[in-house]
Image: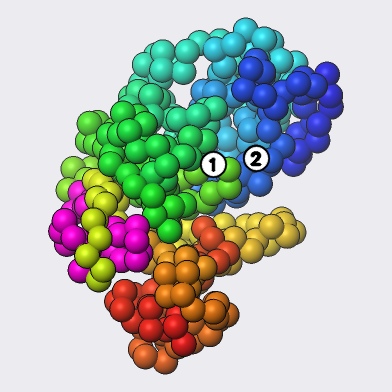
Amino acid sequence: MLRIIEGHAEILVPEHSLTRKSETFYNPAMEYQRDITMSALRVWQKMAGHALSICDPLAGTGVRSIRIALEVPGIEEITINDANPRAFALIKKNIKMNKPEKGIGVEITNKKANMLFLEKPKEFDYIDIDPFGSPANFVFNAGYALKPRAILACTATDTGALCGSFPSTCFTRYGIKAVKTDFFKEAGIRVLITAIMLELARHDMSFKPLYTHSNHYFRVIGAVRRSRSMLSAQFKQIKFLAYCQACLYRGDAITSGCPNCGSKMGIIGPLWTGNIKETEFCKKMLEDLLAKNCRKTKELRTCLLEIDGPGYYDLPRVFRVLKKAPRKIEDVMKTLKEKGYEASRTHLSDTAIKTDAPYAEVLLAAGG
């Protein structure tokens, strides 16, 4: 066993814990993801104004739950679960090593996640679904266990399916048609958000994205409300998008041929086209991280300056379509702004921009 320090937690980790076959999976590359989770929960707890009940249904080593117990004020109870008996035994050891604050109720269980959800109706303020692969099979049952006002986080590592590399897999897992795009990370995030929305809608629950990010995974943290009116408003922003893989044209008018080059159009959807972040919540997260002297704030800062709307333009791909020499991102953005359009970078890609400019104007700005 290795001893690992992450955040305020010190945990035991099996030496071979980074493979899919590992029975107690731990990935140090996900530390940033967990840092962000701690911040989001601290912000949420202040906004909620009451102690929180937490569920970590696929806990692995238990590192996320232990960090929550040690780093997030106002936690009432944490249910830490893993169906694997060896992970269950390791979680108990790690909890004993870290000694959460008195007053926090800790329950460690050894069950299938979906069974746990069904046994805990309306019990949790926060559930974190972080599997190895797709979260699709867990979201609906998680809806039973969430309180009427709650927060849900979902991580997916099946990024190829979500971003359109394996469209048949995306459709069978998520019920959404996907194609490859130049904004593949955002497309994957939006497919994941849409799938969560559709599953929670069966409980008359809406889902509002608060923060999203990607690495070798896609992750979304969102607010859940049992509200038919909010659900109705949400569905107005679920649409179909048309996309041309030849020239990168995109739009919401479904046509068989691309209006720009005549190539066959791919269809993506149904797809969430609303915001993938909540600006005020992200501001509070940035303030929280700065107060903790955290240096990993570039992504959040970029996110706060990012304009809304579906789809970014990957400029290297745009330059290849135009057969033009690359221009600096700042210069392309400056050209668009001088014409009266909004333009920004995106926290999902270092080589892309977001803009409200029409497709033709983007090409003109990129062409110089």
**Image coordinates for residue 241, horizontal then vertical, percent:** 25, 56
Q: Amino acid at mark 2?
A: Met
Q: Which residues are magenta?
A: 235-259
Rendered residue at 34%/81% (across/down): 361
Estimate how packed mark 1 is, as few (under 14), some (14 to 19) or many (20 or more) residues with alpha carbons within 10 Å. some
Q: Is residue 53 visible?
A: no
Instruction: Work out whether residue 263 or residue 216 is closer to the camera in this orientation and state it.
Output: 263
Q: Does the CB distance between marks 1 and 2 fall below 8 Å? A: yes
Disc number at residue 30? 2
- Residue receiving disc 1: 217
- How much space separates mark 1 and mark 2, taking CA atoms? 9 Å
- N-terminal of the pair, mark 1 or mark 2, is 2
Instruction: Work out whether residue 294 or residue 338 is closer to the camera in this orientation and state it.
Output: 338
Left or right: residue 159 versus residue 264 is right
Rendered residue at 83%/19% (across/down): 1
Instruction: Work out whether residue 344 or residue 181 is closer to the camera in this orientation and state it.
Output: 181
Q: Amino acid at mark 1?
A: Tyr
In terms of image quadrants, where is residue 98? top right
**Image coordinates for residue 21, horizontal then vertical, percent:** 63, 17
